[in-house]
Image: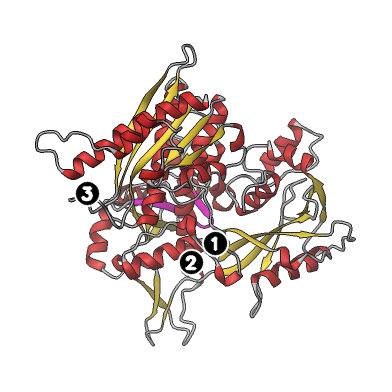
Amino acid sequence: YSTVERVETCMEQLLGAAFGVRYCTNELVLVSIDVLNMSLTTPAFSRLVSALKQCNKTATVVESCCGGLIQSSIMAQPGSSAVFWGGTVSYNTRKAKPILLNDSSLHSALTEPLEAGNAESEEGLYVRSKLEHTKRVATAYCQQMGTDYAIAESGASGPTFRPRGLDKGFAAIAVAKRDAQSGEVSVVKQDVIRSPHNDRQSNMRMFADAAAKLAFDAVQEDFGGESIADIDAARQDDGAAYHFDRATKLRTDAENLSEVAKDAKYVVLRGGQSLFGDGWELKLMRYDEVQSLCNATGAEVRTTFLGILDGKDAFFGADLLGGNDDSIRDVFAKDDDGTHFSDTRTGAPLLSPLHNELALHATALSQWQRRNQYCSVCGVPTELIHGGTCMKCTSCGAMSWPRQDPSMIAAITSRDGDSILLAHSQRHPPRLHTVLAGFIEAGETFEKGVAREAYEETGIRIDEDSVQYIGSQPWPFPQSCMIGFVATADSAQPLELDEDEIVEARWFHKDEVRAAAAVEGATMRKEVAAAAIDADPDLPLLIPPRGVIARKLIDTWLNKLPL
C-alpha cells in the first residue's frame, strides 16, 4: 500500500504490476472490513445525468451486452428519477421480441442476417447488423416512451464470439433525439466502440461509459453547442476519466527514467505549497522552466518520478529547497499570468481529479523525503534511489519506502436520518463544522476506531453494526490516508466534548446543512469563510468544500447517495 494512494488506486496498481491487468476502481470489494460495496458512479454518468437535469431533458435505455449497467449507472446518480424513465435489457436474441415493444420488424432486424456486401467479412457484417439494430431500436423506444432521448446498445462483450474473425469485444451505440418543435425522432449520434480484449466485465464498463459519453455529447449539442456549466458531479474523483500509472518498473530503470525526465511535466512544490496557475489548476512546468526558476531565486531542486498518464505523458515532482521568497514573488510578478504558490492542503480540493492526485502524490513524497534523511537503523545519512521513491542508507544499505498512516473519518447521523453530528475545532475558521476523524490505533479495526473516536471526542455511543465504508482519500499532511465511513447513533444522547480536540459540536438538521452546502469555494480558508458569513450572516454553519472526503461523507447523507 504505497504512500498517498486511495485504497482503490492501490488495488489497481497491484494488479497492473503483477499481471498486466487493468483494474476498474469502481468495482472494489472491501472484504477486509466486511463491506460489499460496488460503486456504479463514474464521471461519464455524473456528467450525463447532470446535463439532462440542467437541460430539463429525459431519457430511456435499451441495452444488450452491457447487461443493465447503463441503466443502473444512471440510477446510481442522485436525482436521476427526474430524467430517467426506465429501460430494458434485450439479451437473448431469439426471445427478445416482447422486450422490443413486441415489434416484429425490430425483432427481425436483430435475428435475420443482413445481405453481405462485396468481400464483406462475417465480422464486418455482424457489426453492421448491430449498427442497424441500435439505430432502429433507439428511434422506436424514443417514440414509444415519449422521452427526449433514447440510448440503444448492442454488441458482443466476450469472451466467446459467434462470428468468425471476431475475437475482441465491441458495442454499437445509437442515440435518438425527439425534436422539441416537430416531435419527430431521429438518430443524432452513433458509434462503434471496439475493445482491445475480450474480458466481459471490463468491456461492459467500457461500453456503458462510452454510451454515457455519446449521450452527453448529444445533450450538449442540443444545448446549443456551448459547454454545459455547473456540473459539479463531473469534478468527483472516480478514477474512470483517466489512467495514471505509477510505473513501478520504470522507477528502477535509471537510464530510461533520465530520458523520460527530459520531456516530462513537473508539479512544482515549495514546503507545504504547490504552484498554481491563475485559476484553480496546477501550473505544470517543463524541466528547463524549473531550472530557470531555481537560477532566478537561488533555490535547489529535488525531483521525484510520479508516473505516466494514459501511457504517454510522464510527470515528476519538483521540490524547491531554499531560495529567496522575494525573488520568487518577483519572478511571478514579472510574468503577470497569475502564477503563485499556495497552500496544498486547502487548495488541492479545488483541483480537477487528475491535478488533485498529482498534487497530493508529489506532496506526500516530498514530505517523506524532508522528514527521513537519516537511516532508521544506524543513523547515517541516506540517498534517494528509484526515481526518488526509495531511501537507501549510505552505510548499512538498509532501504526504506514512503508510508502513510490509516485514519478514520466518519459522518455520524441520527437514526431517523434527519440530522448529522458535526464538530468545530480551534484550527477551523469561524462556523466551519465537519465530521469526526482520528487515527486508527495499533491492533484496532476501522469499525472499532470509528466507535472509539466518536465516543472520545463527543461522548456519543454509535450503533457499531451501522458502520459502512464510503471511500478513501490520501491526506499527506504529513502522511495519512483517510478511510471514510457513515454510521448512526441515538441523537438523544448527551454530548460530552473533549475540549482539547473539539470546541463545539451539535446535531445539525438537513435544512441547515443544505444551506451550508450552497456556499462555494475553499471554505477551509479563513478569508473564504469570512466572505461567506458576510454575504449571509444568518448561515448556521459552514462545511468543507467539494473535493475532500469529509464533504463526500456529508453529501452521501445529505443527498442520500447509494452506498
Q: Is residue 515 magenta?
A: no
Q: Residues within 10 Å of mark 3 (few under 14, many from 20)?
A: some
Please identify the residue farthest to the left as the structure is shown.
Answer: 119
* C-beta proximity under 8 Å, tags 2 and 3: no
Q: Report how far apart the C-alphas of labels 2 and 3 lie in the structure.
A: 47 Å
Q: Are marks 1 and 2 in contact (CB under 8 Å)?
A: yes
Q: CA distance from mark 1 to mark 2?
A: 8 Å
Give, as a three-letter code, the residue at label 3. Pro
Q: Which residues are magenta?
A: 264-274
Q: Position of residue 269 (x, y in %)?
A: 46, 54
Which numbered disc flags the more N-terminal residue, 1 or 2?
A: 2
Residue visible at 58% across and 53% down in the picture: 345
The numbered mark, 2 or 3, whose residue comes first in the sequence reads 2
Q: Which secondary structure type mostly characterizes the magenta part of the structure?
A: strand
**Residue that mark 3 sits on:** 163
Q: Residue at x 45, y 45 (%)?
A: 282
Check disc 1 and report the residue beneath it: 476
In primary-sequence order, the first of circles 1 and 3 is: 3
* Pointer 2 residue: 3
Q: Is residue 509 visible?
A: yes
